[in-house]
Image: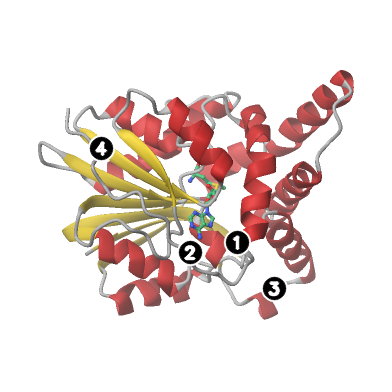
């Protein structure tokens, strides 16, 4: 199997949200995601009639991975995919299991995720690097696919992160993004949505969600072609409905064991709750999968 021989140098760059906030959040709260997903998927799921069980969260979370994989339309004997903001590498492990001809590089800011995520990737053809996804050390035009699942929201789906995805891709290859987006500017949100939005940005250390039309324009300006925007909010809703049960279960388990709830865990719990409130305002928010070709 082809092995990865990419430079492991670190690069630093300040983003608008404090990098330290993001690092602190994920270093402290990543362990909690075990409660959300035994495969350590740190995203929402994708429900499909007849294919996924709405009561089994991991089947929906992994279906989201499959949906992203499918949209990359990978071809060729050896292919390499970059995961920008890879978390614990849940998506990477899912892809690598599915596709033995694939190699993967994930980047994240969190040293905890690098340490633990790389342990889980041992013996597999993937590696997680400590890098900023707006400025990676991955060579230009080297990737057969680039993905960003619920990660680019940390920088508001800004031009730097999208341009980095473009730089990494070989000509004709695809970047696939899955995330929540705003359907209108924050100033035009109704009070309920604004309440939910402010809470989730604060709790999850987000710069702010991208406005879907602006992100589409940004992708075209960067040079992407065939930008396909799919709203999948109703496919995602069943997994969002798991949030209150997961939060309650998490709290009860920790109370029962006498474990204190860490500050970043509280932030995570609060943000999850706010995401549920936001999810109820489909006029203002939506969950989208974007596929853009270089
Ligand atoms: C909600 S998690 C999603 C993880 C993964 N994509 C998944 O779905 O399981 C967001 C991830 O984005 C990463 N992240 C946020 N800002 C980043 C940045 N500027 N550069 C690299 N990674 C970043 C975090 O470290 C975290 O791993």
Could you tell me which quadrant the C terminus lies in?
Answer: bottom left
Q: Bin the neighbour count of mark 1 within 10 Å (Cα to Cα): few under 14, some 14-19, many 20 and up.
A: some
Which residue is more in the foreground, 10 or 108? 10
Cβ–Cβ under 8 Å for marks 1 and 2:
yes
Cβ–Cβ under 8 Å for marks 3 and 4:
no
Q: Nearer the viewer, mark 4 or mark 1?
A: 1
Quadrant location of residue 96?
top left
Relative to 24, residue 260 above or below? above
User: Callout 1: helix, strand or loop?
Assistant: helix
Instruction: Identify the residue position indicated by label 3 in the image.
Output: 189
Relative to 18, residue 7 above or below? above
Viewed as shown, does residue 99 lie left or right of 148?
left
The residue at 40%/28% (across/down) is 121
The location of residue 147, given as percent across then percent down, is 37, 51
Is the residue marked 1 within 8 Å of ligand 1, measured from its CB? Answer: yes
Q: Nearer the viewer, mark 3 or mark 2?
A: 2
The Cα–Cα distance between marks 1 and 3, rounded to whole angstroms, is 27 Å
Instruction: Identify the residue position indicated by label 2 in the image.
Output: 12
The Cα–Cα distance between marks 1 and 2, rounded to whole angstroms, is 10 Å
Instruction: Identify the residue position indicated by label 4 in the image.
Output: 103
Q: Earlier in the sequence, mark 3 or mark 2?
A: 2
Q: Earlier in the sequence, mark 4 or mark 1?
A: 1
Cβ–Cβ under 8 Å for marks 3 and 2:
no
Q: Bin the neighbour count of mark 4 within 10 Å (Cα to Cα): few under 14, some 14-19, many 20 and up.
A: many
The residue at 85%/19% (across/down) is 257
Instruction: Identify the residue position indicated by label 1 in the image.
Output: 19
Which residue is more in the foreground, 286 or 81? 81
């Amino acid at each position: 199997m082809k092995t990865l021989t990419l430079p492991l140098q670190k690069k630093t760059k300040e983003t608008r949200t404090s990098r330290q906030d993001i690092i602190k959040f994920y270093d402290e709260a990543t362990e909690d995601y075990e409660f959300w997903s035994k495969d350590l998927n740190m995203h929402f799921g994708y429900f499909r009639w007849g294919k996924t069980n709405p009561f089994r969260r991991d089947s929906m979370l992994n279906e989201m991975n499959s949906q992203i994989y499918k949209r990359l339309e990978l071809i060729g004997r050896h292919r390499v995919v970059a995961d920008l903001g890879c978390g614990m590498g849940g998506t990477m492990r899912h892809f690598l299991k599915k596709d033995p001809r694939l190699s993967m590089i994930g980047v994240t800011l969190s040293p905890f995720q690098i340490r633990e995520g790389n342990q889980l990737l041992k013996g597999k053809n993937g590696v997680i690097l400590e890098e900023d996804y707006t400025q990676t050390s991955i060579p230009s035009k080297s990737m057969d696919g680039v993905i960003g699942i619920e990660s680019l929201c940390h920088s508001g789906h800004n031009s730097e992160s999208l341009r980095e995805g473009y730089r990494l891709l070989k000509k004709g290859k695809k970047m696939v993004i899955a995330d929540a987006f705003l359907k209108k500017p924050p100033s035009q949100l109704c009070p309920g949505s604004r309440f939910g939005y402010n809470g989730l940005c604060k709790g999850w250390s987000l710069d702010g969600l991208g406005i879907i039309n602006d992100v589409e324009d940004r992708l075209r300006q960067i040079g992407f072609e065939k930008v396909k925007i799919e709203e999948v909010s109703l496919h995602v809703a069943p997994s969002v409905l798991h949030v209150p049960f997961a939060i309650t279960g998490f709290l009860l388990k920790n109370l029962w064991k006498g474990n204190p709830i860490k500050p970043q865990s509280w932030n995570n719990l609060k943000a999850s709750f706010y995401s549920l409130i936001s999810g109820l305002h489909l006029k203002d928010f939506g969950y989208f999968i974007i596929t853009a070709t270089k």
